[in-house]
Amino acid sequence: MGTKLLEICGFIKAQILNSDTDGLLIRIQMIRAIGIVALFKGNLQCEVPLFSFLFCSGVVLAATVSYGVVWWQHAQFTEKLFGPKRPPDLSGLLIVRRVTPAAMWIGGATAASASNVLRHYGRCYWELSKARLRCTAASTSDMLRHYGRCYWELSKARLSALVVATSGAGYVLGSGSIVDIAGLCYTCTGTMMVAASANTLNQVFEIKNDAKMNRTMRRPLPSGRISPVHAAMWATSVGAAGTALLACKANYLAAGLAASNLILYAFVYTPLKQIHHVNTWVGAVVGAIPPLLGWAAAASEVSLNSMILPAALYFWQLPHFMALAYLCRDDYVAGGYRMLSFADPSGTRTAWVSLRNCLYMLPLGLLAYNWGLTSGWFSFEASLLTTGLTIGALSFVLDPTHKSARRMFHGSLLYLPALMAGLILHRLPNQ
């Protein structure tokens, strides 16, 4: 029986090696399968030649197909993972040397050689699995980094941080002798999410305008790094989540102020920027609501003394943005935005609007003291700060140039954090 089996296997081997198929690896693996069959030649006790032939043929055919499928899957995976060329460190793992089938054929396969085969291919597939995991982890990391950067820019993180700071200051001013730290964190988080949503929707509606301005053409939407649908979904989800957080952890008044501010910014202020320069005053209202939101979250009400910081924010924004609009006048004209500086190339009207609103801020320190919001020291400090900003605006009026506008702009950046720090430092507990 053993002699017949060897004759059958020798015939099959000769047919495989003489075929004109290009799959050399598959032919070698078929030889290996025949060698494995020969391993059991001493155990086959069947006396029926036809049954022996069918048995051997079935084993060889099954081994051939299985090896062919495994190699084809490996080749497809390697090409998908590393490109048309195989990776250098894995190129030789599955190349079968001719000495292996020859040795298995001539001397008869042994249990040791079969164990070596299993160990070899096990190591190969283990290395491939680790390479695939490394590739998947790298691609996932790149994707997270890409979208994280896009969300950061869509949210205008620095502007949103300023909104959160004003909201947090309003929360502290509206608190009693003890500030609820957990409530403060919930309020700031919800405000941040709503602000991110509003800023994202603003960019979704202004893709074409931003693409025309040097200052904004590299944002995620004009540059094509993220789709408008994706950005709109991000804005909707984060805005809804922020409003819900405020409603659950603060109160419905704070959530209502947040939702109304989002609508006012995205659906009133944003389209108005391309229609009339009154958009600057509407935008100032938008900027004045966050400190009122923080006060409402802490006190669950809105009172007269809660208007000090919102009023300061409203009047502060006008000289701040008037200076910015004058400095970026050409960019705003290219983008199609209707600012006051659009029809004021000399800058005279823009400078006078800035000075007027600085003068409006002068009595706010005294009002904060009279209404029991702060101590008398804040009245003195606020008057000094506002006087300095007013001098900068007066300089802009007397000499409406880019230099004086930039000086007033930088002064406004210093004014706001100093004013809020004085409010918090000298605040009196809200009764």
Image (cartoon, grey):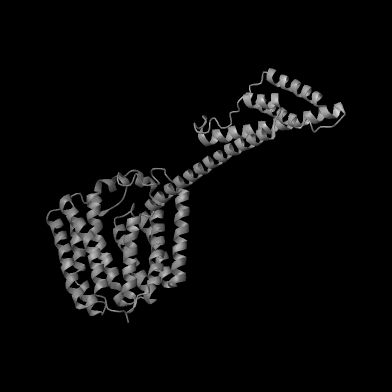
- Is 260 located above or below residue 21 in the figure? below
Count of numbered marks: 0
**At which x and y percent is residue 327?**
22, 50
Residue 354 lies, in percent from the top left, at 20, 60
Does residue 170 appear in the picture of this structure?
yes
The quarter of the rendered structure image containing the N terminus is: top right
Q: Is residue 285 visible?
A: no
Residue 249 placed where, x, y %? 45, 71
Left or right, 312 with respect to 184, comes to left
Residue in the picture at 58% in, 38% down: 123
Above-or-below relation of 71 to 260: above
Apparent side of residue 52 relative to residue 169 in the rendered image (left or right): right
Residue at horizontal 42%, vertical 48%?
145
Q: Between 289 and 71, which is closer to the camera in this rendering?
A: 71
Residue found at the very far bottom of the displayed protein: 431
Quarter holding the C terminus is: bottom left
- Residue 274 appears left or right of 312: right
Furthest residue to the left?
398
Query: In the rendered view, does 391 fall on the left or right side of 425?
Result: left
